[in-house]
Amino acid sequence: MATIQGVGGNCTLIGTGATTAFDAKLDAWSANLSTGIVQTSGFGDLGYRTHEATILRLSGSASGMVITEFAPVPVLALGATFLPASCKGSVVLTVSANHTYTFNALISNLTISRPEDGKCTVTFDFRSDGPVTQSSWS
């Protein structure tokens, strides 16, 4: 298990109804990256077993700013009851300008501030729910 962190990314959070969806621009995150060996044998391996290292799970916490086309943030999003495993998100974590992790996640411990003026902050915990795509390019 490795701990990684970054200062950028974004997340589209989807709650219990379509009207509770909103975006978050992340300004800080920290995650635990679990890797493991999985069997990838196929017909082209001529009966030999092959194995590859892969990302198994990415979990952690993030904070940022709520981005919405509505002003202020929709009341349904602020007042929504996010039951366990009912809030999901499409997450992109940015390590650097050319290194990202993209995955769907289960969201928990969601907190949204209610400012009268200024930045509307959001913090949440996440756990990958399915494949994690790591992108690196130069």
Image (cartoon, rainbow, N blue to C red):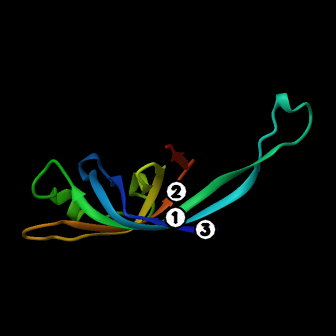
Q: Are marks 2 and 3 in contact (CB under 8 Å)?
A: no
Q: Amino acid at mark 1?
A: Ser
In this rendering, the label closer to the viewer, 2 or 3? 3
Q: Residues within 10 Å of mark 1 (few under 14, many from 20)?
A: some
Q: Position of residue 34 (x, y in %)?
A: 63, 63
Along the horizontal axis of the image, is 135 left or right of 78? right
**Would you place residue 111 above or below residue 73 in this image?**
below
Residue displayed at 28% across by 46% down: 18
Q: Which residue is mark 1?
A: 59
Q: Are marks 2 and 1 in contact (CB under 8 Å)?
A: yes
Q: Amino acid at mark 2?
A: Ser
Q: Residues within 10 Å of mark 3 (few under 14, many from 20)?
A: few
Residue displayed at 54% across by 60% down: 58
Please report whichever mark, 2 or 3, sits nearer to the chain's N-terminal start: 3
Along the horizontal axis of the image, is 69 left or right of 4? left
Q: CA distance from mark 2 to mark 3?
A: 15 Å
Q: Closer to the camera, 74 or 115?
A: 115
- Quadrant hosting residue 10: bottom left
Q: Which residue is mark 2?
A: 128
Q: Which residue is mark 3?
A: 2
